[in-house]
Amino acid sequence: MKNVVISGSGLYRPPHVITNAELVQAFNAYADLRNAKNAPRIAAGELPAMVHSSVEFIEKASGIKQRYVLDKSGVLDPTRMRPKFAPRADDQLSLMAEIAVHAATQALAAAGRSGHDIDAVLCAAANMQRAYPAMACEIQAALGAGGYGFDMNVACSSATFAIEQAANAVRSGSAKCVLVVDPEITSAHLEWRDRDCHFIFGDVCTAVIVEAEDSATSGDRWRILGTRLATQYSNNIRNNAGFLNRCEDTDPDARDKTFMQEGRKVFKEVVPMAAAHIEQHLHDLGFEPTQVRRFWLHQANLGMNQLILRRLLGQEVGDDLAPIILGEFANTASAGSIIAFHEHHADLKAGDLGVICSFGAGYSVGSVVVRRV
C-alpha cells in the first residue's frame, strides 16, 4: 500500500490574549449585574445567586492560564459576554476562511508546496461559520487549489477524522496532496456567562499537508502508519444551535444554543474509552505504548490527559513524552492535538514513533500513529 506522510503543519494564533485574571474580573462583574437585576427573585428563592469565579478555580479545574481570541472587548464586556465580529459582504473572504488561509499558508511552506499543488481541501472543525457554500470550497479558491473540498464536523475529533479521510484519498488515488485545515472559532459557541465552562475555550487554526511519501519534498515527513476512528453516542457534550431553531420558535440566546457539558460524566467515560482506543490501535499495529516517543493528545483538561497516560503507561509522565499546550491556548476543540504536534515535534529523530489522538463530543475518538521518516 502507498505510503502517506504528513509533510507540513501550520498554526494561526489570534491577535488577542485573555488571561484568567481578566476573564474572572469580567465574569464576576457580569455575575454582580445579574444578581442585582434578579435580587427579588433570588431573595424569594426562585433563582439561585450566581457565584463568583476565580483564577485558582480555573487553573485547578483545567490547567488553563490564558487563551487566544479573535475579539477580546466583546468577551470582556460584562453587558455582552460574547465576541463582537463585524459582518462581511458576501464577496469578501469570510472570517473562518481568513484564519484558515493563514494556517494553510504556513503548512504549505513547511511542506514545500503551493496552493496549486493541493487537489483536496478538508475543512474540519467543531462549528462552521455557515452551512453552504462549504468553507472548504472558499478556502480552496483563496489558495488557488484545484480538485475538491468539503467540510466535516466531529466536534473535538474533527482534525484526526479528517486526516484519515485525507490519507485514504491519497492511497486510493482520488487526491495527491491534501490540505486538512481546522479553523476553530470556539469563542463564538462558548457560554462565557456560565461559571462551570466560561474559561474552557480559545480560538486558533491549524493545518497539515497529507501527501504520498514518494512525491513529498519536505525534510520533515511523518509516515502515517495507521489511523483509527470510533464513535459512541452521548448527550453529555452538546450544542443545540442549528437551522431548525427558527422553526421551533425557541430563544436563539437560550442556554442550550451554546456549548454545554456534563463535565464529571465526560471525564469518567471518555478517559477509559480514549486509553483503550490508543492501546488497541498500537497493539494492532504491533506496538506497545512504551514504544511511543511522544503522545500529542487532545487538549481539553490537564487531569484527563494525565489519567489517560497513566492508564497507558502505568506511571506519571512529563511534558517531554506528552506535551501540554493548555496553559497557553486553552481548549481549542479539534485543533488541540495538532497544536501539540506542530509545536513539539522538531526535536524527534528519524524512526521515532508518535501518536496524535483526539477525543470529545459524540463521543468520538480518533488516533493517528506516525513515525518520523
Image (spheres, rainbow, N blue to C red):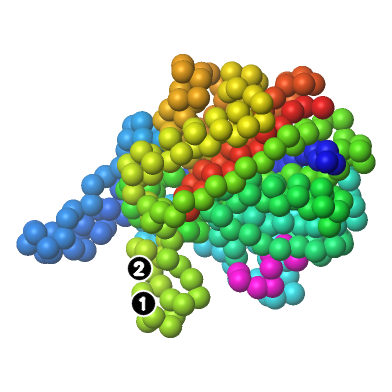
Q: Residue furthest left?
A: 44
Vertical position of residue 82 compared to residue 360: above or below: below
Question: Is 86 placed left or right of 327 in the picture?
Answer: right
Q: Can residue 334 be seen in this view?
A: no
Residue 250: which disc? 1
Residue 294 picture location, percent across and down: 63, 24
> How many numbered marks appear?
2
Amino acid carrying mark 1 in the image: Thr
Provide residue 320's location: percent of width, then percent of height. Answer: 60, 19
Q: What stretch is highlighted in magenta?
A: 130-138
User: The residue under label 2 is which amino acid type?
Assistant: Ala
Percent of width and height locating residue 105: 80, 48
Q: Residue at x 64, y 55 (%)?
A: 124
Residue 283 lies in quadrant: top right
Marks 2 and 1 in Cβ contact (< 8 Å): yes
Q: Residue 254 carries which label?
A: 2
**138, above or below 301, in the image:** below
Q: The C terminus lies in which quarter of the figure? A: top right
In the picture, the quarter occupied by the N terminus is top right
Residue 238 falls inside the magenta stretch: no
185 horizontally vs 269: left or right: right
- Give coordinates of residue 342: x percent, y percent: 69, 35
The reply to whether the magenta stretch includes residue 131 is yes
Which residue is found at the position 81% from the left and 33% from the top? Answer: 221
Displayed quadrant of residue 214: top right
Q: What element carries label 1?
A: loop
Mark-to-mark CA distance, 2 and 1: 8 Å
- Identify which residue is drawn at 82% across, 52% down: 172
| Residue extending farthest top | 315
**Residue 132 can be seen in this image:** yes
**Picture quarter containing residue 3?**
top right
